[in-house]
Image: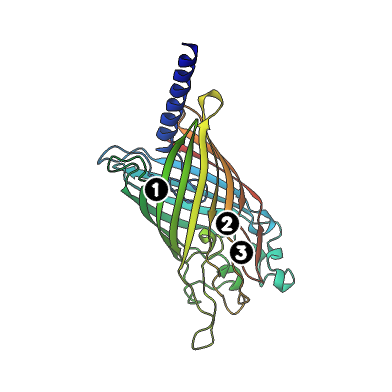
């Protein structure tokens, strides 16, 4: 009888953890650009909302200590869900200039062509939307992942361009200050003993470098006039894996890692950035804390944004602290 009671307690505990984790994941939190996701990557879930109705919005503030070159980066987001399948939102990205931004120009003797802070300190606006094509465990199965498609548009993004061409607008220089992403993502929660395993993988097509933090993505080579090739779209994968389990005070803890492949090249500007290098994959190790019964969650992370974007430009952000908080109304 004692063994049977113990088994019942174990099974009950597992079921409660699983139900709590799955319900919490349904309103898990917003990522760096305001999408339901981890810190850097989107999930196939959307902000909670009733059938055929708007839900209550979620807002988020994120911070990245980008170091002396990238500076202190911030995003402020608001996202709204509709009908359990769709979400859309707005994000503004702004920064505090780094203390040694000129050091990013490693190939130019540590001297920027103009004011070094213009590299990564300008603000820009992001709009995004996501639609869930297939709900998790659809067709009365236990193995079908949630599958969603999404799009991101960034406007007024003159980073890097503004430093190389001081006082010249992007339009006058023939360089776009708009970039964006199109992506597909699949997410699955798998109960395993006393934890929930989070699996997330996707593919995006983007013409932005580092989510726009470093301006536009480009391509290697020259056109018929011997000018560097301009802004270009690239296909890149991203993935997240994590574990969700019950924490202190009946909270939900999620620990995980994520990786985001970046376009290999940044856009060449005014014959300055031409010595191309493969931009490395970005990644993070994160902890998410969701207090039970509270309308918010908190993220902390160790983030690798990037090192060298080209032989001339190094953002020096390979092991940086990041954090964020999401609040649900």
**Image height of 140 relative to 97, above or below:** above
Percent position (x, y) of residue 24? 43, 34
Element on which disc 3 rests: helix
If the image is split into quadrants, where does the C terminus sit? top left
Q: Are marks 3 and 1 in contact (CB under 8 Å)?
A: no
Pick the residue in front: 251 or 99: 251
Characterize the local packing of mark 1: few (<14), some (14-19) or many (20 or more) Cα atoms within 10 angstroms. many
Q: Which residue is mark 3?
A: 118
Residue wearing tag 2: 282
The answer to which image quadrant residue 80 occupies is: top left
Image height check: is 12 above or below 296?
Answer: above
Front residue of this view, candidates 239 and 252: 239
Q: Earlier in the sequence, mark 3 or mark 2?
A: 3
N-terminal of the two: label 2 or label 1?
1
Q: Give the image location of residue 15, x and y in percent.
A: 42, 27
Task: Report the front residue among 235 and 51.
Answer: 235
> What residue is rendered at 30% in x and 41% in y?
54
Q: Local crowd at mark 2 within 10 Å, few (<14), some, or many (≥20)?
A: many
Q: CA distance from mark 3 to mark 2?
A: 23 Å
> Horizontal and vertical percent for residue 291?
50, 29
In the depicted structure, whether residue 260 falls above or below residue 220: above
Disc 2 + disc 1, Cβ < 8 Å: no
Point out the frontmost of discs 3 and 2.
2
Query: Which residue has dot 1 on it?
Result: 44
What secondary structure is marked by label 2?
strand
Front residue (pair 116, 53): 53
Of callouts 3 and 1, which one flags the residue occurring earlier in the amino acid sequence? 1
């Amino acid at each position: 009888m004692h063994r049977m009671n113990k088994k019942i307690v174990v099974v009950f505990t597992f079921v409660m953890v699983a139900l709590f984790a799955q319900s919490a994941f349904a309103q898990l939190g917003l990522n760096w650009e305001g999408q339901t996701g981890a810190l850097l990557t989107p999930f196939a879930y959307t902000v909670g909302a009733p059938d055929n109705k708007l839900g209550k919005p979620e807002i988020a503030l994120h911070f990245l200590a980008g170091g002396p070159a990238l500076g202190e980066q911030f995003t402020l987001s608001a996202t709204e869900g509709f009908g359990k399948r769709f979400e859309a939102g707005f994000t503004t990205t702004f920064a505090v200039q780094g203390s040694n931004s000129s050091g990013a120009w490693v190939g130019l003797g540590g001297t920027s062509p103009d004011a070094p802070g213009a590299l990564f300190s300008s603000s820009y606006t992001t709009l995004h939307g996501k639609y869930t094509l297939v709900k998790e465990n659809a067709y009365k199965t236990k193995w079908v992942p949630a599958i969603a498609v999404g799009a991101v548009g960034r406007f007024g993004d003159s980073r890097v361009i503004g430093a190389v061409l001081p006082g010249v607008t992007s339009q006058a220089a023939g360089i776009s200050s708009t970039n964006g992403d199109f992506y597909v993502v699949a997410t699955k929660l798998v109960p395993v003993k006393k934890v929930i395993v989070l699996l997330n993988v996707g593919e995006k097509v983007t013409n932005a470098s580092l989510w726009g933090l470093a301006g536009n993505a480009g391509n290697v080579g020259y056109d018929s006039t011997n000018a560097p090739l301009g802004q270009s779209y690239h296909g890149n994968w991203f993935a997240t894996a994590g574990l969700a389990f019950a924490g202190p005070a009946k909270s939900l803890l999620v620990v995980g890692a994520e990786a985001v492949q970046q376009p290999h090249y940044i856009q060449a500007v005014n014959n300055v950035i031409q010595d191309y290098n493969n931009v490395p994959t970005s990644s993070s190790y994160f902890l998410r804390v969701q207090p039970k019964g509270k309308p918010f969650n908190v993220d902390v992370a160790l983030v690798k944004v990037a090192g060298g974007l080209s032989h001339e430009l190094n953002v020096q952000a390979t092991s940086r602290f990041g954090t964020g908080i999401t609040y649900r109304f």
